[in-house]
Amino acid sequence: MSTFTHTPPPSELACEVCGRYPEPPKFRLTLANVAAMLPIELAVHAAVVGTDWPLALKVALLAVTATALVIWVAEPGARRLFRSWLHAPALRRRRELDVAPALWRARATLPDTTGALEHLTHALTRLEVNILGIHAQPVRSGVVDELVLSAPGGLTEQDLLDAIEDGGGVAARVWPTTPLALVDAPTRALSLAARVAAAPAELPYAAAELLGAHRVPEDKALPVEWHAAGSVLKVPTPWDAPLVLIRPGVPFTPAESARAGRLAELAEVVERQRAGRA
């Protein structure tokens, strides 16, 4: 959409601390200086050459006057007069950066009805947002969809949240991500399982990474509303204390709870095998 493809003004290139502009390309700066100096040089020469002064005086006067005018007038004037043209390559790169696609992860609950996902897709398409990946998890209130989105660089988090809400999504969350989010979810889960199989002590870290959550000590007091909202998950482990994971604002789904439980079972099996061999 044209809304996101604006041309940034040259002032955006100025340093926030000193206010200076980056050094323009040498070729462009040379052409701008020639364009600014040529009229001055011609005017000075016309004024001096027509006099009856001695040749040495003319040469000295031309050299000093032209040099002073170039330093004080021509070069600063050229940088101001041709500023947009001088910095056009940098401005073009800045514009390309502004409109470059950005990757986002989104999570929202949709009603478990026919056409709900299609309605959300249409709402995102109106902003030229592409859905690169989707994973659905059934919950009591509907279906939780986890999306990987490619959006125009000019879009903000609020733009995406508004589009998701317009598409029927509730309890939406959006955050920037990286191409790692495009890794196939089963492949990622298997990689984490292999990590736990090799070292059962990695279970807390692998489970937290798998669910995008944070690990906290079992005895840490957590807000009651987090428990009520399903943002706290306790996973039994082969050790004495359970694994406590939190994800404020994003309730854990039954499928996610099952995944963490399976990882814990894998760690327990490996621990038993090692104990039997010992």
Image (tube, rainbow, N blue to C red):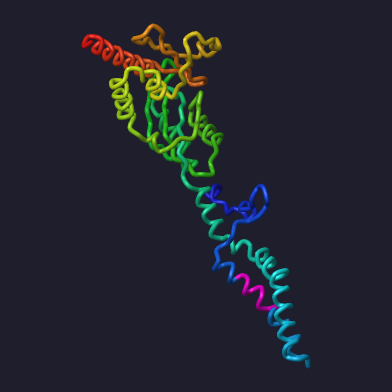
Q: Residue furthest front?
A: 56
Toward the viewer: 207 or 9? 207
The C terminus: image quadrant: top left
- Above or below, 117 relative to 247: below
At horizontal 47% and vertical 10% (from top left) the residue drawn is: 218
* Residue appearing at x 41%, y 37% in the figure: 131
Name the spot of residue 104 as percent of width and height, x first: 46, 35
Identify the residue at the far right of this view.
Answer: 52
75 vs 15: above or below: below
For this rendering, which residue is in front, 74 or 116? Answer: 74
Between 134 and 61, the residue placed more toward the observer is: 61
The image quarter containing residue 22 is bottom right
User: Vertically, is 226 above or below 44?
Assistant: above
Number of numbered discs overlaid on the protein picture: 0
Q: Is residue 18 left or right of residue 196?
A: right
Query: Could you tell me if residue 221 is visible in this image?
Result: yes
Boundaries of the magenta span:
32-40
| On screen, residue 99 above or below 259 | below
Please tell me which residue lies in front, 216 or 152.
216
Image position of 169 (left or right of 191): right
Q: Measured from the top left, where is residue 49 in percent x and y?
A: 73, 89
Q: Outermost residue toward the top? A: 240
Q: Position of residue 167 (x, y in %)?
A: 48, 31
Principal SS element in the magenta part?
helix
Residue furthest left in the image: 277
- Horizontal and vertical percent position of residue 147: 42, 31
Residue 200, quarter of the rendered image:
top left
- Does the magenta portion include 266? no
- Can residue 112 be seen at all in this image of the molecule? no
Residue drawn at 47 percent across, 41 percent down: 102
**Residue at figure coordinates x 38%, y 34% from the top left:** 133
